[in-house]
Image: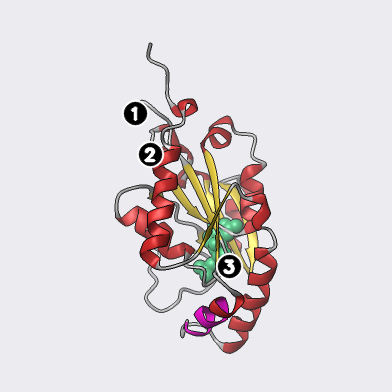
Amino acid sequence: MSQRTGVLLLVSGPSGSGKTTLCRRLARDGEAHYSISCTTREARNGEVHARDYYFISKEEFRTEAGVGHFLEHAEVHENLYGTLKSEVLEFLQRGHDVVMDIDVQGADQVRACEDPLIKESLVDLFVMPASEEELRERLANRATDAEEVITLRLRNALEEMSHAGRYTYQLISGSKDNDYGRCKSLLVAERLRVSRFRQTV
Ligand code: 5GP
């Protein structure tokens, strides 16, 4: 058994802030398990079921919610998204760190969670675009989304950014490597908290 419990790193930020890339890179480098969410939205080009998301129907989503399989769930951009408990709890117990790409509503629900393991594991980070122009550009460069989707996402992004004050940590996005370096430093530091260690002496 690991000497410590895992860190649960919640990463939020508007679409186009680069948070998904950050989370994915932590997982690719073996730093944390990426919690694969369920969603009712259509898969984008190149996205793979059970790697990027579990793409499920609204009906399946409601069933999962009804039987209590979700740690949190929320409606984002007119689609449903949810984190499965099975993607998080066992990993933390085994001392693995978990990274979650999650919207502000979902982050609120995880913060309100009574489970002691979640409470002691939680670290929350908001990724802020450097400026509104930068965000606009990043969203427009995402060729995968239709114009009306981009407009909706921009509106939601500004709303989402107004919740950044609820997070303990904030990263103002710069270059991808620099963002990654800072995010990884946060994870490395959080692993050292005394409260995460199972006392053996
Ligand atoms: P996208 O459709 O661009 O992949 O994600 C849209 C939004 O949903 C992003 O803000 C992302 O962080 C959020 N999201 C992804 N997975 C989850 C989840 O499991 N729960 C919640 N609450 N939000 C999620």
Amino acid bearing label 1: Ser
Residue at 34 percent of width and 28 percent of height: 2
Amino acid bearing label 2: His
Q: Secondary structure at mark 3?
A: loop
Confirm whether the magenta stretch covers residue 138. yes
Q: Which label sits on residue 2?
A: 1
Q: Secondary structure at mark 1?
A: loop
Please give left or right for residue 197 compared with residue 80 in the image. Answer: left
Residue 126 in view here: yes
Confirm whether the magenta stretch covers residue 35. no
**Residue, disc 3:** 14
Q: How far apart in space, not on screen, are marks 2 and 3 (Cα)? A: 27 Å
Q: Quadrant of the C terminus?
A: top left
Q: Kindly report the secondary structure that dominates the magenta region of the rendered protein.
A: helix
Magenta region: 135-141
Q: Where is ligand 1, by quadrant? A: bottom right
Q: Is residue 117 above or below residue 112?
A: above
For marks 1 and 3, give the one nearer the viewer. Answer: 3
Q: How far apart in space, not on screen, are marks 1 and 2 (Cα)? A: 8 Å
Indicate if the residue with disc 3 has its beta carbon within 8 Å of ligand 1.
yes
Residue 8: horizontal and vertical position, in percent?
Answer: 49, 43
Residue 6 or 190: which is nearer the viewer? 190
Q: Is residue 21 above or below residue 43?
A: above
Evaluate if marks 1 and 2 touch, with contact meaning CB atoms under 8 Å apart. Answer: yes
Pointer 1 or 2: first along the chain: 1
Q: Quadrant of residue 46?
A: bottom left
Q: Quadrant of the N terminus?
A: top left
Residue 120: horizontal and vertical position, in percent?
Answer: 54, 33
Indicate if the residue with disc 1 has its beta carbon within 8 Å of ligand 1.
no
**Residue, disc 2:** 96
Residue 193: horizontal and vertical position, in percent?
Answer: 46, 31
